[in-house]
Amino acid sequence: MYVGIGAIVVVIAIIIFGISNLGPIIKRAVNSYGPKITKTELHVADVSVSVFSAEAKIKQFFLGNPIGFKTPSAVKVGSVLVNVDEKSLSSDTIVVDRIEVISPEITYEKIGKNDNFNTILKNITQATDSEKGSKQESEKEGAGKKLIIRNFIVKKGTVNLDLSVYEIGDKQISTALPDIHLKDIGKEKNGASPAEAFKEVFSALYGTIASPAVTDVLNKQLAASGVNLDSLGEDTIKKLGDTTGKEEGIKDIGKKVKGMFGN
């Protein structure tokens, strides 16, 4: 997410097979390996590959939310462009010149102190740790090749917050995601595994989503929507961390609403 990110990296790892029908093979690899990293729904609709130029176009990337969250997706991307240094395809370390994630639609869902992106990041971290502990299993999943990504770019993204999750109407508030540009992922280690690369780009994405450039704008819009304790139903109070609905719980939930995107 960084969006699509583990799956996108897997695309590069699979390109090494160098056979004619790469698109369907990459698609199957992404759709099977990606969910094992994120522990959520993850799939792409299509992958087209130019063998001669080592360019791939990933269409309709979808990253779902973990169990317990209400919105259907964390990240949706219509198009992701990947350019590979074709000279590296036969080596142990694949060099990706550029991955460009165009106009990702990000849905941020925060309940109490937890949120959907933090949960997914924890899942990715667990997958990375498991990979380190079992090289043999990692190779079975198609992650034997190492990767260096020279440029990872996310641009023209949008961060959405669905207020219906908090029972304060069906309005959606949104703000622009600042552009992201990471360089030389995996270079210091002479190559990173797909899961490691996924973790690095997703961590950067999460850090951008949680930055003041995003959260301050969402907080202002939230305040402008007229949210107050009287407008919150009992179910919302429970969702945000109180199970009693009594006076102490109401005071606590007031603090959470006030700083829904703060610490």
Image (cartoon, grey):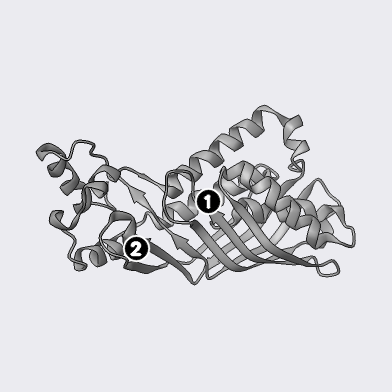
Q: Where is residue 168 in the image (x, y as percent from the top left)?
A: 25, 60
Residue drawn at x 60%, y 54% is: 5
**Amino acid bearing label 2:** Ala
Q: Helix, strand, or loop for circle 1?
A: helix
Q: Position of residue 164 (x, y in %)?
A: 32, 60
Q: Mark 2 points at which residue?
A: 213
| Closer-to-camera residue (235/161) | 235
Classify residue 135 as left or right of residue 60: right
Q: Distance between the residues labelled 2 and 1?
A: 18 Å
Q: Mark 1 points at which residue?
A: 202
Residue furthest to the front: 234
**Amino acid bearing label 1:** Phe
Q: Earlier in the sequence, mark 2 or mark 1?
A: 1
| Closer-to-camera residue (258/184) | 258
Residue furthest to the left: 247
Image quadrant in which you'd find residue 241: top left
Circles 2 and 1: CB distance less than 8 Å? no
Classify residue 255 as left or right of residue 59: left
Q: Helix, strand, or loop for circle 2?
A: helix
Q: Where is residue 160 in the image (x, y as percent from the top left)?
A: 39, 64
Residue drawn at x 52%, y 66% is: 104
Q: Is residue 146 above or below residue 164?
A: above
